[in-house]
Amino acid sequence: MGEAIITLEKKLKDSFPEMVVYKDLKKSNFFNSLTLPSFMRDWLIKRFQAEDGFLGEEQIENIRNFIDTYIPRTKQDWNKIKSRIINESERVKILAKISVDIDIKTGWRFFTLSDFGLGKADTGIPNNVWYDFSDDFLAANEIWGIVELAYLPKDYSEDKKGKIIITDFKKFCPYQIDLNFYKEARKNFTIDEWFDVLLGAIDYNPSGYKERVHKRTMLSRLLPFVEKRLNLVELAPKGTGKSYVFERLSRFGYLVGGGKLSRAKLFYDRSKKSRGLIFSNDFVALDEIQTISASDPNDIRSALKTYMESGQYSGDDFRGVADAGIILLGNIESRNMDEYTDLFFELPNLFKESALIDRFHGFIMGWNIPRMNDDLKMNGFALNSEYFTSIMNLLRDDITYRQIVDEIIEVPKHADTRDTEAIKRTATAFLKLFFPNVQSPSGIVAHEFEEYCLRPASKMREIIKYQMGKLDDEFKGKDIPNLLLKEKFR
């Protein structure tokens, strides 16, 4: 075991020399107290780690000083910063998430700091700053970076109102993300080694898992990170890390923690004329689904069905197209951990409709994931989470993998279109996740594709189809199509 770990560590360092950090999540408790997301934590570690990759007292103290200086964590911190900017005429730098937009009528460029309640009415971006950093500002709906803020008094503002303006910007990512480099590096690892690399990248210790199925099930949570509009349901015991993966791991997704679900929040807010969560995220995970309610369930259900089918939303005098996957997350009691029981009996009526469930491509059996414990916390060198989640975001736009899946899979006659699409889309996501180096049908080993991509995708859809039969007699006893590799690829 020791030799295997050393060999994998060496491969990892050789293959990703600039993207590896030392994660000791058993000891780095000071990060936990700050509730920083994983991508920001790893960015800080990468910035301040010693040459050998470790964090000593000096490095930890430097991180603390940086956080105290650049990351406001409370409303009081932000109020102090505003006072320095407005009352003391300081230019203050903070590490923050911003979104940028342009007013069509006035041409004024503005930004929002949603984490601190700073909106477009109180902000601006001067022409010189816009021209210097517009490529960075427009790279995504929301971007992270070190933002230098200053105050523009009302006498100098076109609308005679004081504004907080950006005077300098440095994008968050400290290195270039090269997707082709990542694909090539994958060739250096066996499939079992790659499982371990992926687990380390998302903060989990591979040696803490007893069986491969546990690893694969955990990694299946990443499928909507790499594939557009992949819709999944996961039911798992409490304490298996659902919220952590979907909320803390990536800056490209969003977790809704139960409560009221509204059309305005999810799709479009007519009163604010602002787009909802599906337009600014790779996925929207609805956590604690047993507790979710809606003032008009039929309205939300109808909007969800249309969007999950086509990626389009139309309503409230607004039309738009988005790529976010919809993920349902819920807890399950041990007595119900059986795919052939009625898994959805505790769900609110909002989700108890076969036509809606049919739009979900697969089911994750979360009971195959062990409850979180110290042995599952990463302790060693691993891929930087910020780098890895950025790679997953880029993989969403690569259509090569779906072309491969379409070419090598044979669809039987009269196969249900939704079943076929669900299996293909999920298999494509597995291919991106486990075999990103594959760029043509001849590049994938047939039995590996079947074992790690096609069969798991089919099983995930099979559970959805079975549960539809529990909700609606029309689907009772209906099987999914048996998709196989074309003979020339077997």
Image (cartoon, rainbow, N blue to C red):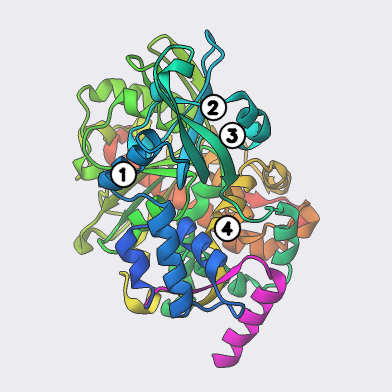
How far, Cα to Cα, is label 1 from label 4?
34 Å
Q: Can residue 204 be seen in this view?
A: no
Q: Which of marks 1 and 4 is nearer the N terminus?
A: 1
Residue 15 inside the magenta-drawn segment: yes
Q: Tell me the kind of residue under disc 3.
A: Phe
The magenta-colored residue range is 1-26
Q: Tell me the kind of residue under disc 2.
A: Ile
Q: Which of marks 4 and 3 is nearer the N terminus?
A: 3
How far, Cα to Cα, is label 1 from label 3?
26 Å
Q: Mark 2 points at which residue?
A: 125
Q: Is residue 335 left or right of residue 441?
A: left
Query: Residue 29 location, x and y as percent?
Result: 34, 72
The numbered dot on residue 353 is: none
- Tell which tag, 1 or 2, sits nearer the viewer: 1
Residue 50 inside the magenta-drawn segment: no
Q: Which residue is drawn at 58% across and 54% down?
A: 430
The numbered dot on residue 388 is: 4
Q: Which of marks 3 and 2 is nearer the N terminus?
A: 2
Query: Residue 189 location, x and y as percent?
Result: 68, 72
Total numbered labels placed on residues in the image: 4
Answer yes or no: do the residues labelled 1 and 2 have beta carbons within 8 Å? no
Q: Name the residue under label 3.
A: 137
Q: Residue at x 36, y 51 (%)?
A: 234
Q: Mark 1 points at which residue?
A: 80
- Tell which tag, 2 or 4, sits nearer the viewer: 2
Q: Helix, strand or loop at disc 2?
A: loop
